[in-house]
Image (cartoon, grey):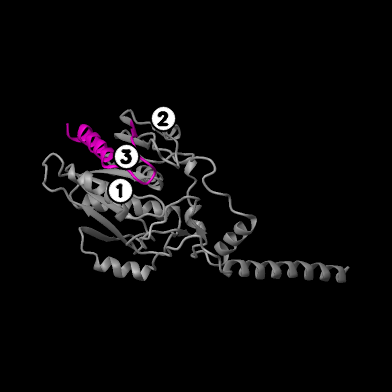
Amino acid sequence: MKKALRIFLYIVISIIVVALIGGLILAYLPVKSKISNHGISPKQAAVLRESYTGPHHVFTTTDGETLFLRRWNPDSVDVKKKDIAVLIFHGITAHSGSYEMAGKPISAGGYTTFGLDYRGHGLSGGNRGDSPGKDRWITDLAESIKYIRTLGFSKVVILGHSLGVASAICAANAVPNEIAGVILLSGAYEGRKGLSAPPSLYDKARIISSSIFRPNYQAIEYYRKGMKVSPDTLFNFRYTLRFVSMLDVKTLRMPQGLNVPVLVGAGDKDELFEVEKVKELYDMIPSTKKEFLVMKNTTHAVIPVESWNQIVDWLNRTFVS
């Protein structure tokens, strides 16, 4: 009996050892990348942040991380708009600099506009493509809103694009009394089918092994067939498992008690989200002050100035008229 027990224990221990060795090998095995843009390190981001000369703000979060806010100022101050700010939450892989397409026309419309670089993105500090977790990520969003209010803007309208839609919904739940309005663009609970091939069993094992043995390693490469890869090294195309899995997007809902104006926009040529699916998100928003906008000649990442001007018009009608 004792001999049989020893044999059983040896087998179990052997299996555990083999699994650990196999996991370590998978976690550290080099993987060929489909993307040539390898991004930058946190140290390089800090150097670029220190040398950045355009209008911006830097603030420190309650856990000591440095976050970067890009700023677009109006050419002239309209007294009816001087206390209103628009805060942009960017999409996955991107950073605030890629939202010049929004910052310029919105600020030209008289609204001071900000763009947050998420932790681990753009010129903000933190491990690239990573977050300590859902709660910290949401706290970062809330603290960026509160920081802008300390600059003298009593009304902050949050604008989320793509992943930023999830960011805006999370922020609205976290600090509903700190926001004056919400704009949700190019996002839905369900994307188009067949955009990317599901990971193989090997890839799944490699990603899980990496998340166990080195959770801060960017084991997941964001790639889909036909995707345009920006040469801008501030873009992130690699993420940790804990970042991409920290939110169940399909469970996110706008808070029931929030009754601020909401604008939901969908591009008529968006290759990731169908207009009908974006409309489903719109239909689930409890606000009685909501509008739906179909943006003409608009893909997922390229939104023409005409669409931004429509958003400025909504801001004017909602907050100024």
Give the image location of residue 222, x and y in percent: 48, 55
Dot 1 or dot 3, earlier in sequence: 1
The reply to whether the C-beta atoms of the residues labelled 1 and 3 are less than 8 Å apart is no
How far, Cα to Cα, is label 1 from label 2? Answer: 23 Å
Which quadrant is home to the C terminus?
top left
Look at label 3 and name its amino acid: Ile
Q: Is residue 281 above or below residue 143?
A: above
User: In terms of sequence position, does the residue under pointer 2 or pointer 3 come before the other?
Assistant: 3
| Crowd rating for badge 1 (residues with CA inside 10 Å; few <14, some 14–19, many 20+) | many
Q: Which residue is mark 1?
A: 88
In the image, residue 217 lies at what x, y percent? 50, 65
Q: Is residue 24 left or right of residue 274?
A: right
Q: Secondary structure at mark 1?
A: strand
Give the residue pinned by disc 2: 283
Q: Amino acid at mark 2?
A: Asp
Residue 159 in the image: state x and y as whole percent: 31, 44
Q: Are marks 2 and 3 in contact (CB under 8 Å)?
A: no
Q: Which residues are magenta?
A: 292-321
Query: What x and y, as percent, mark residue 11?
Result: 78, 68
At 30% from the left and 55% from the top, the residue drawn is 97
> Image quadrant for the N terminus?
bottom right
Task: Name the residue: 57% across, 60% down.
Answer: 207
